[in-house]
């Protein structure tokens, strides 16, 4: 059961792994009244420790940390990723890049869990899979709430059985990776549908409810709060903020009129990104093989970021990306609350 006072701080800075999520971004959003998340995915455990300690020193308010729970490693994933790599290789070679080696890893899950148990942020949330029951118990004993991400209505029963404190209802509109426990590859419900269908049942089970997906304004948040959410998370809205670690090419492309698509082309796991040549040419061929494909394509994506070649970058973005406002994070947070109050 969540004991946080979401009524006072119902707006949330979502975790955005792989660069955009930074300590300065979280601190600025928190100073503007938001509940801020740090993204712990892809960080070394020591870096995660340092980021938590730095944010705790900067802002004397509760905050959350998100990490990836380990994905399954099917025997066929490596061979499927290698076959995909054979299709990508000529394109990568034309850019002067050698693809990486497909492989499995658990993103140092055990070591990161130890750090989170020791430092006990107010909330620890999980994406990609759900944590083992013993991990949930350890975190809760340490004083951290545990939240899990879901994309489908029938996943709520699993969350209740796991004994967590809250659920993040990630709608189909959300940018970045699908965070629920199963990557079905199918279109999933919108955030409005998830909130409408699940908020009452979640509250009856004493679970907090956070809504995420396509949310860009305080008015968007008001709609979801009125529908039953306790809190509403913003991700894409903060990508252009100066405190974010978003690559310049990514910021530029947010406003260039591209549409979005959900694709496995970059990492082997479904994620919403801006449409590019990469997504158009290779989405159909990309296997469900995370993190093997992630490691395969990492050198090409890093090259795209470094050179500003948008067609070679995973340009994560929610469906509302065209409404992104280029403002410092604290100013944007305060504006979102102004819009929320004006619409309520």
Image (cartoon, helix red, strand yellow):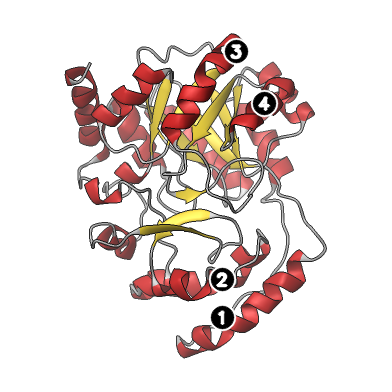
Q: Indicate which disc, 1 or 2, sits on the residue closer to the N terminus.
A: 1
**Neighbour tally class for label 3: few under 14, some 14-19, many 20 plus, Cα within 10 Å:** some
Q: Indicate which disc, 3 or 4, sits on the residue closer to the N terminus.
A: 3
> From what the image shows, is residue 296 above or below residue 261?
below
Report if residue 10 is visible in the image. no
Q: Disc 3, disc 4: CB below 8 Å?
A: no
Which residue does the image show at 35% across and 71% down from the upper left? 310
Report which residue position mark 4 lands on.
159
| Secondary structure type for disc 1 | helix
Q: Which mark is residue 1?
A: 3
Report which residue position mark 2 lands on.
297
Q: Disc 1, disc 2: CB below 8 Å?
A: yes
Q: Quadrant of residue 234?
A: top left
Please tell me which residue lies in front, 135 or 318.
318
Residue 184 horizontal/vertical position (percent): 64, 50
Q: Nearer the viewer, mark 1 or mark 2?
A: 1
Report which residue position mark 1 lands on.
88
């Amino acid at each position: 059961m969540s004991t946080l006072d979401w009524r006072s701080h119902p707006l949330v800075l979502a975790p955005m792994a792989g660069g955009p999520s930074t300590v300065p971004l979280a601190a600025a959003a928190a100073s503007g009244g938001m509940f801020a998340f740090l993204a712990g995915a892809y960080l070394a455990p020591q870096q995660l420790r340092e980021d938590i300690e730095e944010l705790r020193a900067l802002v004397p308010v509760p905050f959350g940390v998100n990490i990836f729970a380990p994905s399954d490693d099917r025997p066929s994933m490596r061979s499927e990723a290698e076959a995909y790599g054979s299709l990508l290789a000529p394109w990568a070679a034309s850019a002067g890049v050698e693809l990486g080696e497909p492989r499995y890893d658990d993103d140092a899950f055990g070591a990161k869990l130890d750090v989170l148990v020791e430092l006990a942020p107010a909330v620890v949330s999980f994406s990609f899979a759900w944590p083992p029951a013993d991990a949930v118990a350890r975190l809760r004993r340490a004083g951290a709430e545990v939240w899990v991400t879901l994309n489908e209505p029938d996943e709520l029963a699993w969350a209740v059985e796991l004994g967590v404190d809250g659920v993040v209802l990630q709608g189909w509109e959300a940018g970045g990776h699908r965070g629920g426990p199963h990557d079905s590859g199918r279109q999933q419900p919108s955030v409005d549908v998830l909130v409408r269908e699940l908020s009452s049942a979640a509250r009856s089970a004493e679970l907090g409810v956070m809504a995420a997906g396509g949310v860009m304004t305080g008015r968007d948040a008001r709609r979801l709060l009125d529908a039953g959410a306790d809190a509403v998370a913003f991700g894409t809205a903060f990508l252009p903020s100066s405190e974010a670690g978003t690559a310049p090419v990514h910021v530029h492309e947010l406003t260039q009129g591209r549409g979005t698509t959900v694709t496995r082309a970059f990492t082997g796991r479904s994620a919403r990104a801006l449409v590019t040549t990469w997504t158009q040419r290779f989405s159909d061929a990309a296997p469900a093989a995370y993190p093997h494909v992630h490691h395969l394509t990492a050198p090409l994506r890093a090259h795209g970021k470094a050179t500003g070649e948008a067609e070679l970058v995973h340009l994560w973005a929610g469906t509302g990306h065209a409404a992104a406002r280029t403002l410092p994070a604290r100013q944007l947070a305060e504006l979102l609350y102004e819009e929320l109050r004006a619409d309520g």
